[in-house]
Image: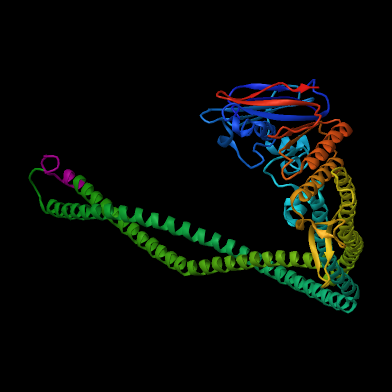
Amino acid sequence: MKLHSVYIDGFRSFANPQELKLDTVPPGLYLVAGVNELEPTLEGNGAGKSSLFEAIYWALFGKTSRNLKAGSIRTWGGKTCKVRVSFDNLNIYRNSSPNELLLDLGGGPSPIEQGALEKELRITPEVALNTMFFAQFSPFFLDMTTTARMEIYSAALGLELWEVKSDQAKDFAKSAAQGAQELEVELARLEEKASTLRGMDYSAAIGQWNESHQAKIKAADKALFDLDLSLAAMAKQHEKLVSAEAKARKDFAIHQQTLKDAAEQVNIARTRGAVIEAEGKTLDRQLQAAATELAKFLKSGKGACKECGQEVGEAHKKRHTEHLQHVCEDLRERITAQGLFISKAQDDRTKTEAAHAELLVNAPALHALEAETKAVQWKLENQNKVKFNKALELGALKKEVNPFRAQMEANKKEAQAVSAKAKEKKDELKDTRDLQARFEFWIKGFKDVRFQVMQESLAQLNAETNECLHQLGLTDWALEFIVEKENKSGTVKRGFLCEVRSPYTEEAMPWEVWSGGESQRLRLATQLGVSNMLCSRLGLEFDFEMWDEPTSNLSPGGINDLMTVLQDRATRYGRRIFLADHRALDFDFSGRLVVTKTEDGSQLGEVEVR
């Protein structure tokens, strides 16, 4: 990552927009000096040197090295804060009020999340503070607790990945073992089931069922045959009853018609009898009147005839007498004829009453015959239904399949299917056991990888650190980093430990026992070694470093050694190393950058290259 320029507006003491251009600045060690026009006695402190470094860090990670964010980094009274950091292949824009993070990869700025930006840069805030920005108030690597050192070391080198992978392999192995146990149980169950199915013998049951089935068919056939005989007899009986009923119905119809005709004749006779009876009475009266007249006429010897008004004479009398006698005779005949008619009507009435009586006698017999015929017909129809159902039952019975034979075939097929499934489970069990073995191998394998990476990185760290330590003037000293150490009591002390071998002690001592300039040189050497090791392991390539007040507690000789180391470092790695210090350091720097504090805020000058 080659740094081209830094644009600052409203960040801390940089109240006004300004840009630091670094395109033409070659590799080397550059002093960042400060001039505080508001407080000359501070010798450059408070000018804004640290703020320049922090602005770059804030643009990358959204916070300062002391975790200040948002409103805490804006110029007092300012409403917004903007920083742009330009590298050779990307530009990063970070704004406050409103908060905004943009990344320009050549196609124009676009919003990006912080995590995505760190992934793009392949660097985290913790790695940055141990590789390219060595802040004034941030602890150096040796200042941290052993636990904190291990956390940063593991996170930077991805050592936790191997622990996670080992734990995952352990979980997978456990899951595979559990799956294998379940498969073993299932396999045993399937094999037992297949054996049980193959061992089932249905031969006796098949024979018994066949005998029983044949007996049922024979009984059903006989029942159907007997039912046919019964139906045939019942059909003949029904046929006779139908014939008898037809004859009786015909006779009854004749009797009914005869009775009807007789009743009509009786009615006619009754009507005519009444008329004749009335006429008879009239004739009787006429006859009696004629007889009386005749008697009177016969006794009469003279006078006029009442019929014709003529004088009664012998001839007239004779003639009239004959006439009256004829009238009387005629009346008597008519009376006799009426008597015969009435007598005949009485005879007809008697016959009609007799026919009606006979009809009354025959009607119940006809009704009984009809009822019997219907009963036989209903029974015949019902038995035909019974026959139909019996025939269906017989057909179904003949179609029945021996269930024991079917069960035996089903068991055979099921046993084959169970055996095939058991084979699948056996193969699956083998694969699961193989998988379990592979996972169990990687439980230790991933830890071995982690251990190997750690050992290689520790060896590199020790080499890098001791080289820097010798360059800083401690030629007879040595630093050794270890992660585990057995104490004299036999217990194991764990953590990212650092021990120092010096000309003044026979044994290696914890670095914490040292103080003053030696302690500062140990801190600086370790920080340089950690930076080299992390950049190498993580593939980070920075063309710049920022060191904020690293000369504290160093003697003039120690300061000169540090400057020499940093100058050689700039040359070796092709970096532009910016060192901020409030003192006037006597060293041949590659150039310098002056930050001036005025009433309008901090002002950046141009980098003066020698």
- Determine which quarter of the picture holds residue 487: bottom right
Does residue 87 appear anywhere in the picture? yes
The magenta region covers: 305-318
Above or below, 289 against 98 in this view is below
Does residue 172 appear anywhere in the picture? no
Residue 399 location (% of width, % of height): 82, 64
Residue 32 location (% of width, % of height): 72, 30
Of 172 and 140, nearer the camera is 140
Of 266 and 484, nearer the camera is 484
Residue drawn at 68 percent across, 65 percent down: 384
Of 393 and 493, nearer the camera is 493
Residue drawn at 81 percent across, 36 percent down: 563
Above or below, 452 against 371 in this view is above
Residue drawn at 90 percent across, 60 percent down: 441
- Of all residues, the one furthest to the left in this rendering is 303
Q: Main secondary structure of the magenta part?
A: loop
Magenta-span inclusion, residue 316: yes
Above or below, 79 against 116 in this view is above
Direction from residue 81 to residue 543 in the image, left or right: right
Residue 521 location (% of width, % of height): 79, 47
Direction from residue 380 to residue 38 in the image, left or right: left
Q: Quadrant of the N terminus?
A: top right
Magenta-span inclusion, residue 378: no
Numbered-mark total = 0
Residue drawn at 73 percent across, 71 percent down: 227
Residue 517 location (% of width, % of height): 76, 48
Q: Quadrant of the C terminus?
A: top right
